[in-house]
Structures are given as C-alpha cells and as structure tokens.
Amino acid sequence: MLALHLTTEPELRREEAAGEYRLSSHGLRLEDAGFIHLCTPAQLPGVATRFYADVSDPLVVLVVDLATCEQAGAPVRWEPAPDADELFPHVYGPLPWQAITARLPARFEDGELHVEGLPT
C-alpha cells in the first residue's frame, strides 16, 4: 500500500544531506513527534491546507511504500490524529529511502493543492 508525505524541497535536501529522513512534518522532527506523519491521497488536500498553505518554499509529495517501511524495520501504525475522525499512517522510525517510490512536485494554485502525477 502507498501513502504520502508532504514536505518542502529545502527540507528534503537537508534530509538527503544528513543521510537519513527524520522529518516528521513541517518543522517537526522524528525525535519530537515519535513518528513520521503520512497520509492517504484522499487526506492530502486537508493536510496540505492545514500545515503548508502559507509555506513559500516549493512543495514535494513523497510517495511511500508502506510494506517497504515494514521490511526495513520501520513499523507503520494507523492512528487517529488530534481533531480528526480518521486514521493516518505513521512510520515509527526514520523513513527508509528505498520506501520512497516517487517525488512529485506540488503547489498551491487558487487555494487548492496541485500535485503532478499523483497516484489515485
């Protein structure tokens, strides 16, 4: 199963330079949250609007294979988020680079998130 992780290009480059992906969500590290936030394609617009609408840096959507996370020793748990009635995938550990199957450019246009090549 695939899930998505939204980040900015500068944040992604910093994680690549560090050699390990430990960014939980915008401005929040794995060490702070205890897991890395992911979402489904249906959840992505809400996540983007809530946490990234005012971000000026270019956005990137990482497509993540959850089975590969598990195989690499990063357990995935589906858990509720505060103020939400739905479950979100959380990766407990650094996001394995081999689990990232695509990097898709994203942008806000007229208040809506547009992602090039987003799987449905």
Image (tube, rainbow, N blue to C red):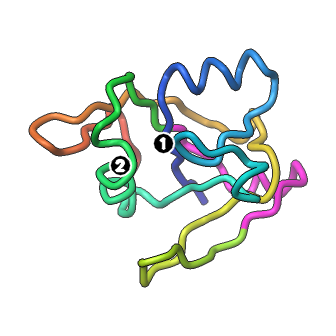
Q: Residue furthest left?
A: 110
Q: Position of residue 54 (x, y in %)?
A: 29, 38
Q: Position of residue 41 (x, y in %)?
A: 40, 56
User: Which type of secondary structure does the marked residue at label 1 adopt?
Assistant: strand
Q: Are marks 2 and 1 in contact (CB under 8 Å)?
A: yes
Query: Which residue was labeled with disc 2?
Result: 48
In the figure, residue 84 lies in which quadrant?
Answer: bottom left
- Amino acid marked by disc 2: Ala
Is residue 82 depicted above or below 2 in this figure? below
Is residue 44 depicted above or below 54 in this figure? below
Is residue 3 depicted above or below 8 in this figure? below
- Amino acid marked by disc 1: Leu
Residue at image point 25% right, 42% down: 113
Which span is picked out in magenta? 62-76
Q: Is residue 27 left or right of residue 83?
A: right
Q: Is residue 25 left or right of residue 105?
A: right
Instruction: Tell me the crowding category of disc 2: few under 14, some 14 to 19, or many 20 or more residues within 10 angstroms, Cα based.
Output: many
Task: Give the mark nearest the N terminus, 2 or 1.
Answer: 1
User: Which type of secondary structure does the marked residue at label 2 adopt?
Assistant: helix
Q: Position of residue 29 (x, y in %)?
A: 69, 44
Q: Is residue 106 left or right of residue 68?
A: left
Query: Which residue was labeled with disc 1?
Result: 6
Is residue 101 depicted above or below 46 in this figure? above
| Magenta span includes 74 | yes
**What quarter of the picture does the C terminus occupy?**
bottom left
